[in-house]
Amino acid sequence: MASTRRLALAAAIAMLNGTACSSLGVEPWERDVLARDEMQLVTDPVQASIDDHIYFSKEASSGGRGFGGGGCGCN
Amino acid sequence: MIVTRAQRRVARGFLAASLLLVSLLPAVAAADDSAALLDISKYRGKVVVVDFWASWCGPCRRSLPWLDGMQRKYADDGLVIIGVNEDNTSEAAEAFLQNVPVDFEIVLDLAGDIAREYELIAMPSTYVFGRDGKLASRHLGFKTAKQDEYEALLRGLLDTGTAASERE
Amino acid sequence: MAATDNKRKRRAGAPQVPGNIVQGLAAATCSLLGTAASMPVAAEEEPQWNFDTALLYYGESDERVQDLSFNVLARRMFPDDKILSLGLGVDSLTGASPSGAIPQNEVQTFTRPSGDEVYPVAPGELPLDDTFLDTRYALTAGWQQPIGRLYTGSAGISFSTEYDYTHAGVNFGISRDFNKRNTTVSLGAAIARDQLDPVGGAPLPLAVMGDLGDLSNRGEDTEEKDVVDLLFGVTQVINERFLVQVNYSLSDSSGYLNDPYKILSVVDPTTGNAIARTPGPGMGPLHEYRFENRPDQRRKHSVFLQGKYFMDGKVLDMSWRYMTDDWGIDSHTLDATFRWPLGERSWLEPHLRLYTQTEADFYRASLPAGELPAYASADYRLAAFDAFTAGIKYGRRTSSDNELAIRLEYYRQDGDIPGDQLFGDHSSDVLYPGLDAIIVNLSYGFDL
């Protein structure tokens, strides 16, 4: 039915208006997995430091890792 | 399963109402919440705080004891706090509440439908409705530095209502 | 299940503030410890100190370098989401490192960097310089806090000292969230000033190794090196269980970039044998060796890509880093860890790291007599080699909710000297025997 199709279109528009402007990502309430310790970009900062120091001493490259992002996304 | 034409019409009507709400919230949330997932119309005349939290969210966990304190302090003045939990399992929410018990109403939003309806953009989020049922304020995040400010806002809303209801 | 879930989440409820640059850049500028991107928070949310401690043993085979170190990272959160980090590290280094000279069929004698002693090396042995007994102390401090709702800023300092080397640095970072915090853009900068006081003084570029007591081939007593690091990164949440990060970093070093203790053997281009010399009145080298010289500038570009994927309790972490610099070195690093929960309190984490690098333009396995380039170094760390690390880590949450872990790793380097650098009957395996090391790391994290 044409009216159903119109409603479906209206639904799609309403949903797009209501959801994130980016197509990638999750809703703020869906970050339980991302909030876990083991899902952080650097799970063990001391170990990362130790390793970076070892490889800096034995190889010609160092660093590269960054910071920021992921996690709970709270506050 | 929709079979009869009448049922189809009802379904379409319901869809239309939901779409209207989705696109108009939060401005109109309280005005037409008969179709809302979280029914706060029964609290008309009171100041309602709807707080979205989860056990995996640090600032949310910090906010619960404070909200509990507010509920105790202003319950007689007409404050109602509803904590909408966004954990994925009821066990996670219950286990958390065993460690941090609170006195206010907890609503489980396992599928996130209420959060979606409120168009949540941050965790935690707090929506404050005045005694008239209209949205008075929305806070994103929870900062202990702003506790006094939040409390002052609640007191302000509680005071206006009291005067109005006394007139009745 | 629920109770454990809650306990894990109690410690796992990181304040989820975006990361701190001290971790990324302090490490890049060679300081020992960085601070955390996020920190574990207790259910009670009482402000308290969180400590991460680690004891490390690094040991190479064949009496080469051994390192024992102790590290502590202390973090405390202040309302609201402000984090103070303090780090301390102590390293005790012993053992010997290849000096850059190559094995010969006869006895070789070398003068120590101090000029006060000579040491012999048996025929066929790889010359190692064992004046590496030293203790290094490193300190870092960092502060991180939200700026407004969507920005996070950080600042930190790093400092380290050992008997012939001092490092001091500052770092800054800022990040902003977009798209309901699904996207985070970060910018970081670190500046460091290092000072070297080589034993005996810094050797003049490509100067010949002198006899006992002869320090005429030395230049300054103190040399300096400046490093500037810049980082631009984007972190993106792909879906509920998948997170990726892409970073570009630039690193500029200038000043004294040599290793003052590394030498090259001068060899006959036909026979490959070291050129004999007559030592002075006292004692001294029996053959000709020259101290290395590197350019006084180095610019490195790195691209880093990391992904973390959650699969039903298990986490796969994979990363790739590509580095290219103006010394002609290109490298690739592939790193993968897989965290496997064992029951409710412990986990196992196998780790594999693959590394490959090309040689520096001025890398020379040895110097043919008569050739004196502007820059030359036989430091194996600038040679072309492949390396891999294979390890396993076991972690356990104790009954008091503290975390204990033990890690065992094996690191191996295999070099390959290009044919045009092999003279006479030189063979790549003999000149560059590679490196074998084991790593044992114990860590303990607790709250006070």
Image (spheres, grey):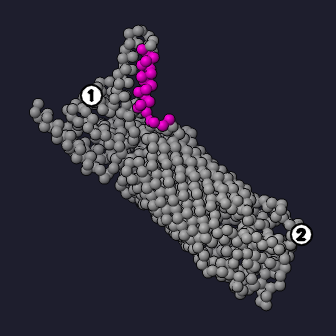
> What are the residue bounds of the magenta stretch?
A3-23
Task: Tell which residue pokes out farthest to the front in this image.
Answer: C374
- Place of residue B59 in the rendered image (x, y in percent of width and height, measured from the top left): 37, 47
- Place of residue C103 in the rendered image (x, y in percent of width and height, measured from the top left): 81, 71
Task: Residue B31: give its label.
Answer: 1
- Which residue corresponds to the image point at 66% horizontal and 56% vertical from the top-left? C324
Is residue C34 in view? no
**To which chain does the residue with label 2 belong?**
C
- Which residue corresponds to the image point at 22% horizontal and 39% vertical from the top-left? B79
Q: Which of the two residues, C373 or A69, is positioned nearer the viewer here? A: C373
Within 10 Å of the Cα at label 2, are there few (<14), some (14-19), or many (20+) other Cα atoms? Answer: few
**To which chain does the residue with label 1 belong?**
B
Quadrant of res C226? bottom right
For residue C29, above or below residue C292: above
Within 10 Å of the Cα at label 1, are there few (<14), some (14-19), or many (20+) other Cα atoms? Answer: some
Say which amino acid is labelled 2.
Answer: Thr
Q: Is residue C141 magenta?
A: no
Task: Residue B147: give its label.
Answer: none
Q: Which of the two residues, B58 or B24, is positioned nearer the viewer here? A: B24
- Which residue corresponds to the image point at 54% horizontal and 70% vertical from the top-left? C193
For residue B31, above or below residue B55: above
Q: Which of the two residues, C70 or C376, is positioned nearer the viewer here? A: C376
Would you say the residues marked 2 and 1 are in contact, meaning their CB atoms lie under 8 Å apart?
no
Residue wearing tag 2: C270
- Place of residue A10 in the rendered image (x, y in percent of width and height, measured from the top left): 42, 22
Quadrant of res C411? bottom right
Is residue A6 in view? yes
Say which amino acid is labelled 1.
Answer: Ala
Chief SS of the magenta region: helix
Secondary structure beneath disc 2? loop
Left or right, B88 with reference to C246: left
